[in-house]
Image (cartoon, rainbow, N blue to C red):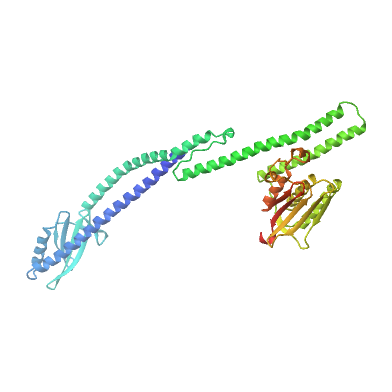
Amino acid sequence: MLSLRQRLILWHAAVFAAGLLAFSSVVWLGARNILEAEIGRWLNTQADGLDRFLHLELKGTDEAAVIEEAREFSTGLPQGSGVQLRRQTGALLLSRPPAQIAVVQDASIVLVEGRRARVIRRETVIEGQAFELLLWRSYEEVDATLWQLARLLATLTPVFLALSVLGGWWLSRRTLQPVDDLTLAARTVSLSRLSERLPVPESRDELQRLCIAWNEMLARLEESANRLKQFTADASHELRTPVAVIRAAAELALRQNREPVAYRQALLKIKEQSVEMGELVDNLLSLARAEERQLQSSFVPVDLREVVHDVEVKSRAAAKAKGLRLSISLPASPATVSGDPASLRRLVYLLVDNALKFTEAPGQIEIGVGARSDTWIVLTVSDTGTGILPEDLPRIFDRFYQADSSRSAAGAGLGLSLARWIADTHDAAIEVTSEAGQGSAFGVVFKTLGDS
């Protein structure tokens, strides 16, 4: 496998060689056409001159005089050319210099004494008598010139090709040197050094955009790694408490023989902590899948009234056990949005569960659905609980955040974070209004299905 630099050099040399070959071919063919056209123009000029010469110089109609005048004209022709004079019947009257002419290609290309030549024929009438004039000129000089040109091009092409390879090597080295520098810098980046960034050149080219993209990727990786570290630390901290309680209850029950009632109380405590730990693990897994976008929802039309009714039935027993009144307020017409029914039920349940945790008897929790406009539908969960302090409002959706550490037994601080993620996946927004000691109201604003 060739390196990128070697491939660039080879491609550069191949393209340059093809260009040189095309250029040499065009030059050679162009030179040949020009030289051959020049011979054609010269022959036409000489033929016109011979015709005029015969008409001007000839005295009388004697055939011998015509031959003599044609012979005199031929003395001025350069070497490699000649003239023939024939009667109209084809009989040869004069050939200077003496030569055998044979047609080999068409009427304009002939062989003169075995050499390729260009010929032109003219008919002229002198005092009523018709003659044929034939002038020719050898291609020997043209062929010699073209041969010299071909040798020159064949000599210079390898030289220019070698210079091209050297230039390609220098250019590729200069071009790829920043890439090598970036590679060395990238190798210094590790999981423990994600805060480092690659140097960004001020070149305003692809390399600059590559460095910027790399640094943006490193920033995202650093953010993900920090979230993972924080997530792991928080999860370990939250799981430690129920595990310790379960272990302590089991060790206390096994320390000595006890009455069945004591064992039952220990098992109930273990069960209670196991349920809490199960919910915590379930929320952790849901957030982990959400973080990696593995929780894919299949969106269908969903009537929020049905979702609220299902959650109300599920939460009725828990509200009654705490001495709370749970009520719902639903519109008469359908409140349809696009979403995943199971995820939407979980969203509402998480908001209701949060209200149950922080509302004491004889409190009230209300779930409502209403239209804010023709475009938006709002699902609200309000309570008469302890409320939220203004300084805590901006952080209530952070993972594991609890406004009051004394309430840690009420949960792990994951419910609202998971609720916000579900709302985000449905392009919905969560609004919160609260006053300490007066209760809280959470509103989830959805776009109606017709305008989605």
Left/right placement of residue 87 relative to residue 106 reads left
Q: Position of residue 124 (x, y in %)?
A: 16, 69
Looking at the image, which is closer to me, 11 or 173?
173
Figure quadrant of residue 241: top right
Q: Quadrant of residue 403?
A: top right
Q: Residue furthest top?
A: 256
Q: Position of residue 196 (x, y in %)?
A: 54, 36
Residue 452's place in the image compared with 17, above or below, is below
For the residue pair 282 and 121, the one nearer the viewer reads as 282
Residue located farthest toward the left when viewing the structure as drawn: 59
The one of 284 and 31 positioned closer to us in this rendering? 284
**Residue at the (23%, 52%) spot, across then down:** 142
298 left or right of 167? Answer: right
Q: Position of residue 225 (x, y in %)?
A: 62, 38
Tell me the quarter of the image containing the C terminus: bottom right
**Residue 47 occupies which quadrant of the picture?**
bottom left
**Spot occupied by residue 313 in the image (x, y as percentages of width and height):** 83, 52
Q: Is residue 225 left or right of residue 271?
A: left
